[in-house]
Amino acid sequence: MGRRIMVTGCSGAGKSTLARHIGAALDIPVTHLDRLHWRPGWVEAPPEEFRAAVAEAASTDSWVIDGNYSKTFDLRLPFADTVVLLDASRYTCLYRVVGRQLREWGQETQAPGCVSKIDAELVQWIWKWPTRRPLMLRRIAAEAPTARQVLLRSPREVSAFLQRLR
């Protein structure tokens, strides 16, 4: 396993959870892109500030960075030695997002000052995930051709992956 690991996939697929497990198993710092992107009240960070923060995180010797934000793939993919794509079904992702919403009701877990929520944009993103997956796979192949590419489609595959890390 490498020391610069990008974790991406659909919302609700388990990116943040997997990133935390990888970071703990390999003793590597974890960066959650949602925490860099969102300001209190779900206000987006200015693009130049967000890109600068992502570039800084990706410039270190070892990292686990989770999140999509394809507009920053150019800052992460060239440096990643491992790219993990979580490819859970849209139904699984929707179920998990609803469960997360119920567990985290009123909490600021995604980013400071951002109370957990589900909105139409998130549901639409999850529902359209299968149409975005091929483009994401092509970008990963083109922009990180030497990186180890790991596709995980089920909780069983995620568990096996984490077992191999330990």
Image (tube, helix red, strand yellow):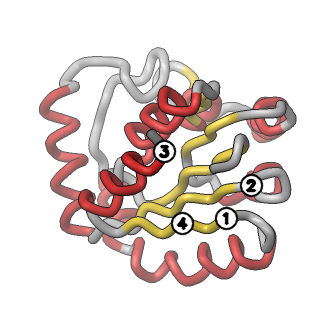
For label 1, the crowd category at 10 Å Cα-Cα, with few meaning under 14, some 14 to 19 and many 20 or more, is some
Asked if the residue under mark 2 is in contact with the one under mark 1, i.e. CB atoms within 8 Å, the reply is yes
Q: Which residue is mark 4?
A: 150
Q: Label 3 sits on what residue type? A: Leu
Q: Which residue is mark 1?
A: 148
Q: Gap in Å between the C-alphas at discs 4 and 1?
A: 6 Å
Q: Nearer the viewer, mark 3 or mark 1?
A: 3
Asked if the residue under mark 3 is in contact with the one under mark 2, i.e. CB atoms within 8 Å, the reply is no
Residue 34 image position (x, y, % from top left): 54, 35
Q: Nearer the viewer, mark 4 or mark 3?
A: 3
Label 3 residue SS: helix
Q: Gap in Å between the C-alphas at discs 2 and 4?
A: 11 Å
Label 4 residue SS: strand
Q: Which residue is mark 3?
A: 165
Q: Is residue 143 above or below residue 78?
A: below
Q: Gap in Å between the C-alphas at discs 2 and 3?
A: 15 Å
Residue 14 image position (x, y, % from top left): 36, 48
Q: Which residue is mark 2?
A: 81
Asked if the residue under mark 1 is in contact with the one under mark 3, i.e. CB atoms within 8 Å, the reply is no
Q: Gap in Å between the C-alphas at discs 3 and 1?
A: 14 Å
Q: Earlier in the sequence, mark 4 or mark 3?
A: 4
In this view, the residue in front, 72 or 42, is 72
